[in-house]
Image (cartoon, helix red, strand yellow):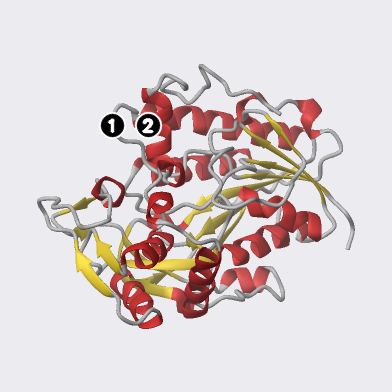
Amino acid sequence: METKRIVITGSLGYIGTVLVPYLTRQHHDCIGYDVGFFRDCTLYPPEPQRMEFKDARDITVADLRRVDSVVHLAGVSNDPFGKLNPHEVYDPTLTYSLRLASLCKDHGVRFIFASSCSIYGKASEEILTEDSPPNPQSPYSLNKLQIEDGLRALADSSFSPIMLRFATVYGPSPRPRFDLYVNMFAGMILTTKKIVLNSNGKAWRPNVHITDVLKAINNAIEYQGTPGTPLILNVGDTHDNYQVIDIAQMFTETVPGTEIRFLSRDGTKESAVDVDLVKDQKIQDGVDKRTYKVSFEKIKKIFPGYSCSWRMREGIQDLLATLESHHLTSEQFNNINYYRLQKYENLFQTQRITKDLHWIHEPSRP
């Protein structure tokens, strides 16, 4: 396979931390760029990667010289809260994503965008495809859709961006995210022997193991087709659409002697579980308005040979085994370093970043 030169933005995030070494093992020449908000948020040592501390907003033409593809992971990982205004956070994200895409278009670089199935938002019981109308229910999902719309407008016969709509990602990474619900369940069950649901658990979600996300990105890099139009692909497995309560029950079946509880509506604190980390402002009166089931048949047709290696039950076992091997503690599980919004909020409140997520007091760089 031909070696390609790849730029990865957000290379020190949950996915980027494992993506750069993975692509390097696929014999690609990779360099990561990251602003460094989560540089020190490691649960265990990551594999080394070649990278520079640089905000995606500051990438220039020089950074794209002789580059074949840009994998754009950088962005706000979920919805701001507290003193962080969604417009002040997401408007710059939209602007710099499309600016970077325009640079790629001007210089013949493939642009691969990390989008999300969350743009489907709220749907009925039917299985949604890439052609189904989006219905975003949060600023995060709306931002992903706005970037997709901007990429469509940029696309022409010479520029065909690839938009990968990831199902809800789960699985181990040295820079974990315990704000992703499957990962959160794993942390809860290992540290408290119970899962605390912040809703009634009836919402539907598609799910994908992080390793299968890496495979999809590599397929996008190596894709030989020239569609002449934007390529939009859901990333996941149709068999891994589950209600949240079903996933919780899989965990209790995997770890005997554990139980499921529900966060009371008045926010009563469950023993050893930090309610402020579990609560979700998008859930009202125990009901999560985001519910959707997704089809993942198109990606298997576009990327011949692509299929997910991990099914849900096996993926849960892999996640639990990895966290156990690194002796996850309650203190670690409740550390804000592994919860993106709480980390952003802390950096803002301690006057280390601005409201539009620029460093004020930047840490020293090795």
Q: Residue 203 versus residue 31: which sits nearer the camera?
A: 31
Q: Residue 144 versus residue 325: which sits nearer the camera?
A: 325
Q: Secondary structure at mark 1?
A: loop
What is the three-letter code of the residue carrying label 1?
Gly
Q: Residue 165 versus residue 30: which sits nearer the camera?
A: 30
Circles 1 and 2: CB atoms closer than 8 Å:
yes
Q: What residue lies at 42% left-to-right and 54% top-to-bottom?
A: 178
Please give left or right for residue 261 compared with residue 35 in the image: left
User: Tag on residue 345?
Assistant: 2
Hey, which quadrant is residue 152 in on the image? top right
Please give left or right for residue 124 compared with residue 116 in the image: left
Eyeballing the image, is 144 above or below 101?
Answer: below
Q: Secondary structure at mark 2?
A: helix
Q: What residue lies at 29% left-to-right and 52% top-to-bottom?
A: 278
Across and down, in percent, residue 173 comes to: 57, 56
Q: What residue lies at 54% left-to-right and 51% top-to-bottom?
A: 43
Across and down, in percent, residue 296 comes to: 53, 71
Q: Which residue is mark 1?
A: 82
Q: Mark 1: give few (<14), some (14-19) or many (20+) Cα within 10 Å.
A: few
Q: Residue furthest toward the top?
A: 360
Q: Residue furthest toward the left?
A: 266
Q: Earlier in the sequence, mark 1 or mark 2?
A: 1
Q: Residue furthest toward the right?
A: 2
